[in-house]
Image (cartoon, rainbow, N blue to C red):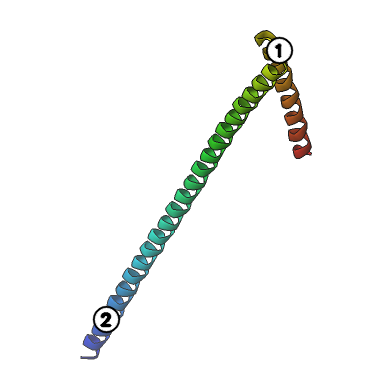
Amino acid sequence: QQQQQQQQSAKEKKEREEEEEGKAKADKATLAASLAAAQTKEQLEEGREEKQRETIAALESKVKGLEEARQQQQQQQHGQSLGLNPLQQQAQARMNQQIAMQQQQKQQQQQQQ
């Protein structure tokens, strides 16, 4: 009878250990799933931020193009008001554009320093 109790006790102990091991494995799987979800969320947010930076850069480029077009138009109108012929207006516009580009390069160099 004592041997039977020892066998029963050993059997129960083994069952408890297996149950605890099963719980530990389940907890580990849950943690792994949580970590994977967090990493996925972080990657999505990084992707979203990258898209936003690209969109901003595209919009800034578009604005710059529009500003240059407006500037050329103003220079043309100014040339007409000065009585310059179309070739003179184009030459003046090119000069003004080069000056503007040089100023912009100076600004960028100053910003980088």
Q: Residues within 10 Å of mark 1 (few under 14, many from 20)?
A: some
* Location of the C terminus (image quadrant): top right
In this rendering, is residue 30 above or below 96? below
Give residue 17's quadrant in the image: bottom left
For the residue marked with disc 2, what is the amino acid?
Answer: Glu
Report whether 96 appears left or right of 62: right
Q: Which numbered circle lies on residue 84? A: 1
In this rendering, is residue 54 above or below 18? above
| Mark toward the viewer: 1 or 2 | 1
Residue 38 is situated, as x and y percent measured from the top left of the image, at 44, 57
Q: Which numbered circle lies on residue 105? A: none
Q: Residues within 10 Å of mark 2 (few under 14, many from 20)?
A: few
Look at the numbered disc 1 and give the secondary structure of its residue. loop
Q: Residue at x 51, y 47 (%)?
A: 49
Label 1, label 2: how many angstroms apart (C-alpha)? Answer: 104 Å
Closer-to-camera residue (21/8): 21
Q: Which residue is mark 2?
A: 12
Residue 105 is situated, as x and y percent measured from the top left of the image, at 74, 29
In this rendering, is residue 80 above or below 68? above
Q: Residue at x 40, y 57 (%)?
A: 37
Residue 76 is situated, as x and y percent measured from the top left of the image, at 65, 19
Residue 111 is situated, as x and y percent measured from the top left of the image, at 75, 39
Q: Residue at x 78, y 31 (%)?
A: 106
